[in-house]
Structure formats: structure tokens, C-alpha cells
Amino acid sequence: MNAVLTLLLMLPFLAPILLANLAEKDRNTRVFAFVYLVLLGGALILVGASSMVTGAMLADEALVDTLAQQTQGLDVAQLRDARLDLAGLVLMLAAVLSLIALLPAVRRLAASVLPMQADNAVHATALSLTFTTFGLNLFQMIALSPALFALAGTDEGVRQLQQASGVSYLDILVFPLLTFIFAALLGVGLYVRRTQDEALQRLGLTMVTPRQLVLSVGVTAGLIALAVATEQVWRALDPVSLRQVGGVSQALLGEMDNPLGALAIGISAAIGEEMFFRGAHQPRMGIPLATLLFASFHVQYGITPATLLVLVIGLVLAVLRQRTSVTVCILVHFLYNFVSVLLP
């Protein structure tokens, strides 16, 4: 069920990518692509405004107490910690930026600092959707993390999260593997603007050389060491938040903290995320935007040292993409995830 829901939720963001690619062959389609993006941005502004109103209402302690009584003991007070007002404001700002990114003058300015073309519909769509998606991810971080972390602080809370998440191998297959691969292939215009060979070349998918294989193992070892060091420092400075983030991760992994689960998670995340972020997105939006977007997708970590670690890992993978290939990035990403899942 989660897999089906994931695909349905992604469709509104995959549609403009397809329209933009079609617009490169049919100029009339460009209007539909841009109108769609404007409507999407407007809808998110309304969602953000609604969240701000809800957040303001939850700031009223008397109202929250009344809701708690009416729901027969449900801890509605936790909603106040969600900061829906701040999350809504962030989403509104991101949606506004996504609309501004469509203006010709802004696209020309962006093209002066990013490896994109101002008059290219695909590049303009990528820039607009970058702000949109970044805003949605931050919205989830701000709105959902407090409640998740509060639950994940106890063993009983972790069990509740495990039951609620119900992550299966099908979910892992669909997201991030199929969804990100589909987005990447749509983005580079497979069978619309490019042939299969051209699309694979654009995505940076090449054979790994023996030297690159050794490099991949070395880089992975360095990243694992960095992760262990980060955890040790984090434990010394803030053991409570470390336990909370660990509880969320444990709940999401469920029964997959075994070699088969590590293999599934490693393969799906490595292939899907690298093809999209380093393969399709980075060559047009640049390292900073692609890396920030990559880190923002790890909403389960909230705004914590874990997110900073993901950001650093993203930067390392981005440099690898420039100096080697996306295939090398996939290998490093897979090895890192596989080992991380199995580490106690």
C-alpha cells in the first residue's frame, strides 16, 4: 500500500518533467509545462498558508486542551511541537521561489552561475522543481520530526512506529529505486530527446575500471569511519537526540537489519538516488543544489548531525561524479548503505 501511495504522490512531480521534455520538440507544449508548474506552485502556497493557520491555532493552549479532551486522550499537544506555522512558511517561500525561477530574467541569472541553459524548458523545470521539492522536504522535517523523535525516544514508541510504517521490500523497490530511476530517465528525455545509448551516456553510466573499484572501496571505508566518528561525537554532546534518530531509523528498517535487507536497501538507494541526483540533476543544477536536495530527502533524520553527515556524503559523491562516473557513485553508495545497515 505504501508503494502505491508513493507512486501516486510522485505523479504530480513527474508530469511536468515529461511535459518539459516534450516541449523541446514541440514549442507549443512549453506553455502547458509552465502553466502546470504555476498551478503546482500555487497549490503548495495554499497548503503552506493552511499549515500556518493551523499552527497558529495550535498555539492556543486552551484549544489544544479542548481537542485532547474531545479525542479521548489522544496526545494532541504533540501537534504544537510540530511547528506547522514554521513548516507552512517554509513551504510557501519555496513555492514562491519555484514560481520566480520561471521568469526569463531569473533563468538568465541562474544560467550565469549554474550549468543550465536559460531558454531550455527542461532546465527551467528542473530549477523550479528543485525549489518545490526542497520546500516539501523541509516541510516534512519541521512538521513531522518532533512527533517522530518523541515516539522514537522509547522502546514502546519505536514499536508503534514500526507498526505504523510497515515498510516492505516492495516499498523499498518502488522508492527510491523505481521512482528515482523513472524521474532520471524522464529528466534526460529517454525516447523523447535521446536514444537509450545517449541517455545512459548523459547519466554517466559507464563500466568501472579496476582502479575505480579500488577507489570505491577506499572512499567507502573513509565514509564509514566518518560516520562512526560523527556518532561518537554526537553521543557525547547530545545522546538523547542520537537515540531518537536511531529509533526512527530502527522503526523504518523494521525486520530488514539483516544481509538480505541490507542488500535490498543498498541496491535500491544506490541505483535510484545516484541516477537521479548525480546522474540527471547535478550536471544541470550544479553540485550545491544537487547535494542540498539529496540531503533534504533524508527527512527521517530531521535537522540533526545525521543530516549534516548525509550532506558531506553527498558532496563526496558529487566530486566522484565529476572525476569518475555515476557508476562509481552507485558502487560507493551501495557499499556504504550495506555496511551501515549491518553495523550494530
Image (tube, rainbow, N blue to C red):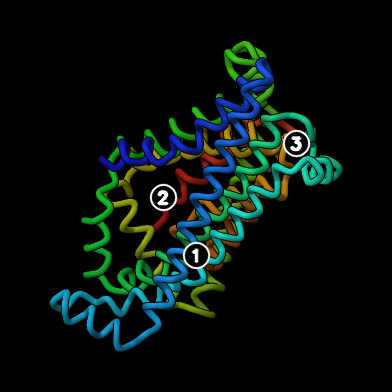
Tell me which amino acid carries mark 3. Gln
Q: Secondary structure at mark 1?
A: helix
Q: Is residue 99 above or below residue 148?
A: above
Residue occupied by mark 2? 341
Q: In the drawing, what numbered circle is on residue 322?
A: 3
Q: Quadrant of the C terminus?
A: bottom left
Q: Is residue 87 above or below residue 186?
A: below
Label 2 Cα neighbours within 10 Å, binned few <14 / some 14-19 / many ≥20: many
Foreground residue among 131 and 287: 131
Q: Residue at x 65, y 45 (%)?
A: 219
Q: Residue at x 20, y 74 (%)?
A: 74
Q: Residue at x 35, y 70 (%)?
A: 147
Residue occupied by mark 1? 88
Label 3 Cα neighbours within 10 Å, binned few <14 / some 14-19 / many ≥20: some
Give how far apart the Cα atoms at labels 2 and 3 are. Answer: 27 Å
Foreground residue among 20 and 191: 20
Q: Position of residue 167 (x, y in %)?
A: 29, 46
Give how far apart the Cα atoms at labels 1 and 2 are. Answer: 33 Å
